[in-house]
Each structure stands twice: as C-alpha cells, then as structure tokens.
Amino acid sequence: MKLILFDVDGTLVDSQNIIAASVHGAYVAYGMEPPSREKSLSIVGLSLVEAFKVLAGPDAPVEGMAQAYKDAYNVLRLDPANDAPLFPGAGECIERLKDRDDVLLGLATGKSRKGVAQLIERHGWKGVFSTIQTADDAPSKPHPAMILQAMEELGAVQEETVMIGDSSYDMAMARSAGVLPIGVSWGFQPVDLLLETGARHIVDSYAELDPVLQGFLGEPSYLPA
C-alpha cells in the first residue's frame, strides 16, 4: 500500500491572500510594523507560533500573535473576496487517487485541525484522507513527526511513502522521515530552496505530477484510460 501525503497551503490550496492579510492583522493588533507580503508568505508551512518566532523574533509575543492571526483569519474567511481556491488540477488529482485500492491519501499541514476540517467540508473531501496530521497533532515542520505518525497510523513504510509540498519545511521534513520529497513550484517558496532542502523532483503543475506519481506507483499511468 502506497501512502501519498499532501501539504495544504501553497500545494493544494491557493491561500496566499488570506494568509498575508491575517499576518498583517496580527501585527496591527500588537501595534507592530507588518512584514512584506513576500516575508509573510515565506513562513507558510510552519505552525503559527514557530512562524511568528521566525517573523518577529523569539522575544516577540508569539503566542498572542498566533491567536491574533487566528482571529483575523476567522473574520477574513467570511468574506468571499478572501476565498482560497484549489490550485488548477488539485481537485482532479485527489479524485483520481482517492478510489484506488492500492493508495492511501493523507494531509501533513501547519494548519490547525479546525482549519483542515473547514477545508475538507468545503471541498467535499470527507473520508478521502486516511490520515490528517496538523499543527495540533505534532511538532512543527520540518520535524518529521507528522510523517512518522502518519506512517505508524497506517502501517506504511518509508520506501512506499511520498510527501508533496511547496516549502523547504516540507522537503526537509520528508528527508528527515526518509520518504520521497516532491516539490511543487507554484507555492510560496522558490524552487532553488526546495532543491537545497531535499526535493527529489520538482513539478510545475498537477499535470506534471502525473508521471512522477506513475513512477512512484510503479505503473505506466495512474490516469483513467
């Protein structure tokens, strides 16, 4: 049985606008000068507390800023203008894989369990993912705990597990867990950084992910005829 793990923000979901706005809101709540949009997005993948340690420094009120981020996010998500759609091809990819009897799907994300539940409800993915690892369940990426816990839950082994993500934290986590790291170029961090932190493959679209997964699944194609 093969285990395919996906990151969420920047990999499945284009959430850059609401993330950047929520970071801005957290800084404003504490009377601090917000970072640039680019810097705000560079920490996507980390848990919120770890993200604010990187952005604002370890001496900043990171716990409070993390809560202020959540408060801002929960308000912003009610506005359709802050919609976070799936990246092109993401939904189709999940649909193709979810009914296979030789594949298990999972999520490994810096989002909260509540945030993941909202995502799953919105996209009709209830029951699709056999394991869901969040910032509430494990140490922040790049610690390998999310992947190790997912494998333990499902009885998966390293050589039959892959991690697909858009950040250096995803790649480093996968490398530390001893599984195949696949980087996507459409996310929040540059390709060079993904390669430096262990990406074995880089894909520019979900269509390009197909042949990589073909090789991983040991088939000519996992697409329907």
Image (cartoon, rainbow, N blue to C red):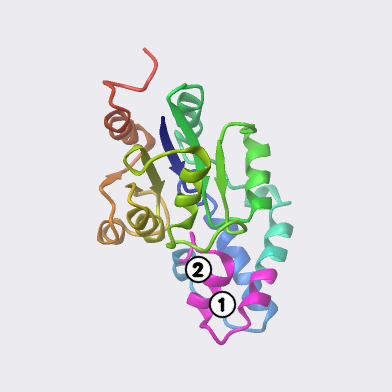
Q: Is residue 45 magenta?
A: yes
The residue that label 1 is drawn on is: 34
Q: Is mark 1 on a helix, strand or loop?
A: loop
In this view, the residue in front, 138 or 29, is 138
The vertical placement of 112 against 58, above or below, is above
Q: Check the image and name the residue furthest to the top.
A: 225
The residue under the point 62% across, 47% down is: 116
Which residue in the structure is indicated by mark 2?
Answer: 40
Side of 222 where 5 appears, left or right:
right
Q: Quadrant of residue 67?
A: bottom right
- Examine the structure image and report whether residue 50 is included in the region drawn in magenta: yes
Q: Which of marks 2 and 1 is nearer the N terminus?
A: 1
Q: Quadrant of the N terminus?
A: top left
- When the figure is inspected, residue 178 is found, relative to residue 220, above or below; the finding is below
Query: Is disc 2 in contact with disc 1, using a CB cutoff of under 8 Å?
Result: yes
Q: Which amino acid does label 2 sit on?
A: Ser
The segment highlighted magenta reads: 43-68
List the single residue furthest toward the bottom.
59
Instruction: For residue 13, say whether it is visible.
Output: no
Viewed as shown, does residue 210 lie left or right of 20?
left
Q: Which amino acid does label 1 sit on?
A: Pro
